[in-house]
Amino acid sequence: MPQITAWFDYGNNSDWVEKSVNVPWVVCRRCSGEGHHGHPAFDGTTQEYWDQQEPGDLDDYMSGAWDVTCEECHGRRVIPGEPEFDDPVEEAAYERAWKRIVYDREVEAMELRYCV
Ligand SMILES: [Zn+2]
């Protein structure tokens, strides 16, 4: 089982604790477990784009001829998933820290938006 380093917030204004936790392997969401995916340069291409390319290019693309090793799992087909906790105190501390991290990122993103 892989391990990830996660933050835990036990509440009551205590300092956050950094801990390694076991997580299950889950199927990579970027490549759906294939280990490779279409070249990112072609992400979001339209039918109009392919209509202007050489005949056969779309077939090559669709057949995976230009695929690259998955950027997310690096070809391993799986990635570390979310930790599962037996102890509700640990789970709550993990969730609390995670919510705080997400909140801080949203605030930061909003600040960036209003600064430009
Ligand atoms: Zn992958």
Image (tube, helix red, strand yellow):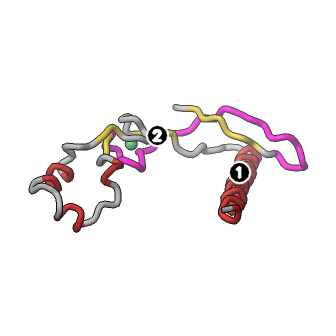
Badge 2 is on which residue? 79
Q: Looking at the picture, does residue 33 appear above or below residue 49?
A: above
Q: Which residue is drawn at 45% across and 43% down?
A: 26
Q: Is mark 2 on a helix, strand or loop?
A: strand
Can you tell me whether the CB of the residue at mark 2 lies under 8 Å from the nearest atom of ligand 1? yes
Q: Distance between the residues labelled 1 and 2?
A: 21 Å
* Mark 2 nearby-residue class (10 Å; few <14, some 14–19, many ≥20): many
Work out which quarter of the rendered image holds the C terminus and state it.
bottom right
Whether residue 12 is in magenta: the answer is: yes
| Residues in magenta, as a range | 10-35
Badge 1 is on which residue? 101
Residue 9: image quadrant is top right
Q: Is 13 positioned to the left or the right of 50 in the image?
A: right
Please provide percent x and percent y for residue 96: 75, 52
Q: What residue type is labelled 1?
A: Ile
Residue 65: image quadrant is top left
Q: Which residue is drawn at 22% across and 68% down?
A: 48
- The kind of secondary structure the magenta stretch mainly shows is loop
